[in-house]
Image (cartoon, helix red, strand yellow):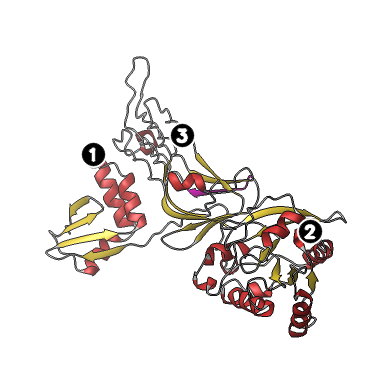
Amino acid sequence: MKFIDKVNIYVEAGKGGDGVVAFRREAYVPKGGPAGGDGGKGGSIIFEATTSLSTLLDFRYHREYKARSGEQGMAKKMHGADAADMILKVPVGTVIYDEDTGKILADLTQDKQHAVIAKGGRGGRGNARFATSRNPAPTICERGEPGEKHNLVCELKLLADVGLVGFPSVGKSTFLSVVTRAKPEIADYHFTTIVPNLGVVQAKDGRSFVMADLPGLIEGASQGKGLGHQFLRHIERCRVIVHVVDMGATEGRDPYDDYVAINKELGEYKYRLLERPQIIIANKMDEPGADENLKAFKEKIGDDIPVFPVIALIHEGVDLPLYAIADLLDKTPSFATEEEEIENSVLYTYESEDEVGFEIHNEGNGYWRVTGAKVERILQMSSLGSDDGVKRFAQKMRNIGLDDALRVAGVQAGDTVAILDFEFEFYE
């Protein structure tokens, strides 16, 4: 199955149902009065994490998701039906961003965890809601509120405890296949691993952890060369980094130079990857010259980082590094990414802010345009088909200060003011 770990999609929640204008005039119903019901709530777009998925492949071929709108209200004060929410399932480890603002809307790290990403619009009120002692028979109602809409970036970041790093063909996939039941593709050429492979390691002392064999690095990966960020994205969540080094130098490179080059790439990535504890697997110790290379390697690296010689192909020496990795995991906390450190940046239930502000734009020749989420929402929910509806809309505009702001901006009597596709003539 093809591995897809980053997709761009568009989501739009359902519009609320419109309220209606209705009156009861049946026989034997004295003073029936206004009886228009409210509209139903629009469906929301909800993302839910699941362990049954491992890729975002479904979103690669279906890029738009729109929830159903609520039903409009009915006579006799009957409420319109609410629309069902649309639930989109994604793999555990998916981070959802707003493409336009770059803000993280949700970080789904647990099975069955869910987040409301686009909230459905509320239903409009029927005329029964507007009856007062001064106006017992109102002819106004509200239209349903539009649902939220977003351009999203969904990014899968693997939830592995341990990340295997190293140049291509140093034996990472072989090591993973030996210590877990994973079956990665293994061949004698560069970039055999072009998708991350996961496996559960069960040490002989009973401890277990998740290990990821991630695509091989090359110099310049932090700038996007080779597999670049496709690799580095998945190591952000790892708590321990395991370097696999070809101590036999079968590719003609110096093992220490390999180690330095990989660390340089990790250090240039933005998530402080070098702060994570490291262990070195000195692989291919059966190759000629491996013992001499290991001795020179240890002299250069010192005693700060443990080095474990292994021959992964024949399972030799693999138990000791597993114990050491488990020991490190026992005392290593999770590392927060930069986005997670920004206060309120990760919202598990996202709700947009109710923006009160508006902007006035002079487009010339006595034509003005007003923009802003609040005024646009008021317009979209106003029923402008009756005089009462227009008066109510004008009163709301005065209540939020738009009249005074237009005068300050220089709007003259007789000028045209537009909000979305609705135009009206300004007068004193």
The numbered mark, 1 or 2, whose residue comes first in the sequence reads: 2
Mark 1–mark 2 contact, CB under 8 Å?
Answer: no
**Whole-number angstrom distance, CA of label 3 to CA of label 1:** 25 Å
The numbered mark, 3 or 2, whose residue comes first in the sequence reads: 3
Q: Quadrant of residue 222?
A: bottom right
What residue does disc 2 label?
314
**Whole-number angstrom distance, CA of label 1 to CA of label 2:** 81 Å
- First to last magenta residue range: 112-118
Residue 155 lies, with reference to residue 145, above or below; the image says below
Please tell me whether mark 1 or mark 2 is closer to you in this view.
2
Percent position of residue 267, x then y: 60, 77
- Which quarter of the rendered picture does the C terminus lie within? bottom left
Please name whichever residue, 28 or 161, is drawn nearer the observer in this view of the structure.
161
Please name whichever residue, 75 or 295, is drawn nearer the observer in this view of the structure.
295
Percent position of residue 219, x then y: 55, 75
Residue at 36% x, 24% y: name it. Answer: 32
Q: Main secondary structure of the magenta part?
A: strand
Residue found at the far right of this picture: 205
Residue at 14% x, 66% y: name it. Answer: 364
The numbered mark, 3 or 1, whose residue comes first in the sequence reads: 3
Type of amino acid at the residue the image marks with label 1 = Gly
What residue does disc 3 label?
82
